[in-house]
Amino acid sequence: MQVLNFDTIVIGSGLAGLAAAYHASKHGTVAILSKSQLDTSNSYYAQGGIAGAITDEDSPELHYHDTVVAGRGLCEKEAVQLLVTEGRDRILELIELGMQFDKKDGEYVLGLEGGHSKRRILHAGGDATGKALTCFLLQIVKEQPTISSFEYTAATKLLIDEGQCTGVQAIDFISGKSMIVTAKASILATGGLSRLFSRTTNPHTATGDGIALAYDAGAELADMEFIQFHPSALSLKDKDAFLISEAVRGEGAWLLNTNGERFMKEVHPLAELAPRDIVAFSIYRQMQKLKSPHIYLSMKHMDPEKTKTRFSTIYNKLKEYGYDMTTDLLPIAPAAHYMVGGIKTDLNGETNISGLFACGEVASTGVMGANRLASNSLLECLVFGKRASEQAAKRKAATHQQIIQGGLSNDPKNEQAFLQIKNKIADLMSDKVGIVRNGKQLQETIIELEAMSKQLPSKTTDYNELKTKQILQICLLITRSALLREESRGGHIREDYQHESPDFRLHIIQQKNKEPLFIPIQT
Ligand code: FAD
Ligand code: SIN
């Protein structure tokens, strides 16, 4: 088996991975492994933009306040402090490097999204911020002589030796061969897992691989029950849940129920711009009440030319679906969008396993609390990608003897069976562990997932079988944690425990072969 060695391995090429690799490249050699093309990631599809308190009317203090309010008592304040202060520095650094955010008359045009008390969302190409940002950083990364990239190469196991992470085992989908990559430090930047739900805004890469790899290696996971459902994803039978950015509501779009009523005005003083958990749940209730599979988003009252220019990507995509967003009512419903919890890290992205780091959507730094404030995640990628890589650079070379383990094979014949079971699990998760949960359904789901897991062999050498096991494991982690949290808070809503409980101002920590822990908020 091919064995390669680098100072740092970065797994994932979304914004967190690219930021981590760029900063790590100043300290030594870096390998980026990405299971798809380098530019396939959640980051690439980001629309609204990146939040940053960069104007005189705004301040990190206000951004901090909005983040903590949205997080519903579960934010770790030190982490949020870093997010809003270093976040501003990271944005200014990118601008210094040449990143172009949208401007008008020489001033940045700032967007507004749910839960923000100020216009502070920088965007690029109107609603193509993710594409602009990732392509910009990708170009910089490609120019660094110390960085080597491995596309279509999926990490399949973390190598743990005497309690330290010494690298990864991976499979190269082009050659079909397994490989070993060793390093002083491995940084997981594998993104989220919303693709494990049947209605999702995420691309196919978001299957929670990093969560499964880290859990299997003994890492602590935090707050797995918190999945953020985005309020406004297109809802058309047999079509993808294409995201229609919250920034559209920031410019004045309305949410109407199927009776044509603007219901959010009754629910929250910020109406359509209330925090995301509140809007998504209110839409769900309207859909239940009126027995409708969707509600509507309306921009009919807005300036059509402005809408077309500001949201040209969304406008063109909706045209493909036969809708004109300036004149038609758009059928929308919530869809799984963002993994709020994840691999527990400290403020430097370090996990409980020496040599293993995590950043971006896969990590749980404590900044997001029980509900992420819109457009804070690209910022988190930049801030904690840098912090993780700098901490990783401080590590000394491991002195152990690497044990080379057996590899995996990828038989394309097994892919169809994998997709079938994946879709079945995604339907189960959407039905019973979706936007509203209850104890009975959570218990039923655990029984069903455990039964499916038991049918699989304990060890496997087939990639698709490994993926099935990983997906079942992750869904069990989400569901068990959702059952344990006997309250409703942020993105976790229980019909049988409808209120926030002060007893649950805590993180739920899960670790392999250990009972779950309840850790009070630290700051
Ligand atoms: P990703 O960008 O998802 O990157 C993960 C990478 O890991 C991918 O390259 C993937 O291929 C790779 N990978 C996964 N598993 C493996 C493996 N086993 N081996 C090797 N590689 C692997 N947030 C905002 O702040 N503002 C927005 O406007 C915004 N809009 C959004 C719009 C959409 C449609 C979506 C889906 C999300 C949006 N978000 C937004 C959320 C935000 O985009 C993500 O949270 C963020 O980009 C995550 O970045 P990441 O680098 O952690 O993960
Ligand atoms: C959006 O543009 O609505 C997505 C923003 C986000 O997920 O932060």
Image (cartoon, helix red, strand yellow):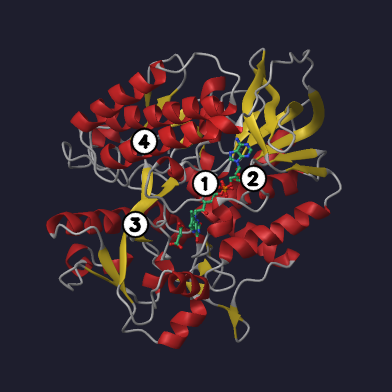
Quadrant of image for the N terminus: top right
Instruction: Label 2: state its secondary structure.
Output: loop
Front-most of 415 and 207? 415
Check disc 2 and report the residue beneath it.
Answer: 36
| Cα distance in 3D space between marks 3 and 1 | 23 Å
Instruction: Label 1: state its secondary structure.
Output: loop
Of circles 1 and 4, the one toward us is: 4
Q: Which numbered tag is attached to residue 424?
A: 4
Of circles 2 and 3, the one toward us is: 2
Can residue 270 be seen? no
Front-most of 73 and 488? 488
Q: Which numbered tag is attached to residue 276?
A: 3
Amino acid type shown at disc 2? Ser
Which percent across, then down, holds residue 512? 47, 18
| Mark earlier in primary sequence (1, 2) | 2
| Mark earlier in primary sequence (4, 2) | 2
Can residue 257 be seen? yes
Q: Hey, which quadrant is residue 9 in on the image?
A: top right
Q: Dot 4: within a 10 Å radius of its alpha carbon, few (fewer than 14), some, or many (20 or more) residues?
A: some
